[in-house]
Amino acid sequence: MTLKRTKIVDIFAPEMVGEQVCVKGWVRTRRGNKHVQFIALNDGSTIKNLQIVIDLEKFSEEELKPITTGSSLHVEGTLVASQGKGQTVEVQAQTVEIYGTADPDEYPLQKKGHTLEFLREKAHLRMRTNTFGAVFRIRHHLAFAIHKFFNDKGFFYMHTPLITGSDCEGAGDMFQVTTLDLGNLPKNEDGSNDYTQDFFGKPTSLTVSGQLEGELGATALGAIYTFGPTFRAENSNTPRHLAEFWMIEPEVAFNDITDNMDLAEEFIKYCVQYALDHCKDDIEFLNQMYDNTLIERLQGVLKQDFIRLSYTEGIKILEASGKKFEFPVKWGVDLQSEHERYLVEEHFKCPVILTDYPREIKAFYMKQNDDGKTVRAMDVLFPQIGEIIGGSEREENYDKLIGEIERRGIPMKDMWWYLETRKFGTVPHAGFGLGFERLILFVTGMANIRDVIPFPRTPNNAEF
Ligand code: 4AD
Ligand code: MG
């Protein structure tokens, strides 16, 4: 009878000791002496390696030679309590089958301690390291937590299109989608491109946000959320920007800006708590390896009520700070990450929700305040990250919304379907967008957004 494989994550259960087990995985290290060899085996199910003990009375040196770092094995043997330090159990091997070798002269992860920059060049293999194993297990658990949070609250998961025919959100530069031959574009008489011959009969792009379609869902199903990839062709080479990133966008009918802030705060705290509860080993590893204030910072966020204040009050604090910022501060400017981080990390030492931003620096759809200068926007600002969430109450008044669209010169013909939410049974509503990778940055303590998505898309980088 063939023995069923046990995942390494399940092998540490007390009742497993004494059992005959079958394990499969990749070799992290092999060491030992003439009498006994020790293999650290990892199968990705946990950060913990399983120690395989090889008695050299049963195996020849020749048989073991191909077992080098990176090779893959199928091992059967008895699980016993370990005598050695560093592990509670180990497998006394009876049979070892080598699935695949990994030539030590060629395997890029042969040595430990590669830099994160080096590993970015090896994105196809880096998930086999402790660090990236931990990060991507945490990424999975956070994605699951997000669906659970909204499902438990009665929100509906809505799939919004990735290819869009409208260019109106204004959230960032867009990647065009076309099947036209770029070397031989069909032209109109006036020399412009003839998009009637393109796949959709009009210019199309990859979406920068699912919000506008999400509003259609919210004003029908009541409360929805999107969770999908979004694309921005901004040429910002920063540790916090990707050209392809994942965004979660809840949108709720009848919510105002306060409800929106409450939802955002509850949501982030839920995700952080979920990660602490379900990713303990991985978070502890990252805390130990990279940033020994990580766990403290995660717990800190859970304990505090986020500070809520207006943009105008925030500017006053920045002006009074006496700090020399690279980008000078005055009312009306868009806040830079240095300003956001000053408020969060130095002034309040707490996450901050800034509201009521100047109308001119925010999107057209945000609800206008009576002062005529500000809109009911909110940004959630986090330690180490800066902006993690952006959102607002939406302008539900048809005339005001049209006025703003015209004032900004947004092509109205692209907007007709959106405007009908305000024309037919309009309601107050609000929503926000959480950048998934920025949440993962916060929870893992990683410093660069390229290290929390398996295959980052950034300017000049789409290799894998
Ligand atoms: O503030 P943003 O642009 O808001 C929107 O897109 C709205 N439609 C959201 C809504 O109200 N439904 O983006 C939302 C969040 C930001 O706070 C940030 O966390 C993340 O998305 N984000 C990025 N993350 C990685 N790379 C980029 N280039 C990002 N741009 C925004
Ligand atoms: Mg924003």
Image (cartoon, rainbow, N blue to C red):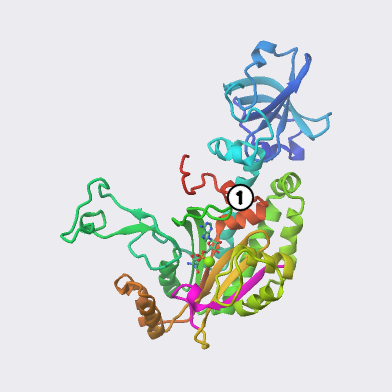
Residue 350 located within the stretch drawn in magenta: yes
- Name the residue located 68 percent from the left edge and 71 percent from the top edge: 306
Q: Is mark 1 within 8 Å of ligand 1?
A: no
Classed neighbour count for the residue bearing mark 1: other residues with Cα under 10 Å, few (<14), some (14–19), many (≥20): some
Front residue of this view, candidates 29 and 147: 29
Front residue of this view, candidates 7 and 122: 122
The residue that label 1 is drawn on is 448
In the image, the segment drawn in magenta is: 348-368
| Residue 292, visible in the rendered structure | yes
The x and y percentages for residue 224 are 48, 68
88 left or right of 181 in image: right
Front residue of this view, candidates 432 and 276: 432
Q: Is residue 224 above or below residue 297?
A: below
| Residue 127, visible in the rendered structure | no
Residue 331 located within the stretch drawn in magenta: no
Q: Residue 89 occupies which quadrant of the picture?
A: top right
The x and y percentages for residue 314 are 65, 75
Report the label total. Answer: 1
- Name the residue located 54 percent from the left edge and 55 percent from the top edge: 241
The x and y percentages for residue 296 are 77, 57
- Name the residue located 53 percent from the left edge and 88 percent from the top edge: 371
Mark 1 element type:
loop
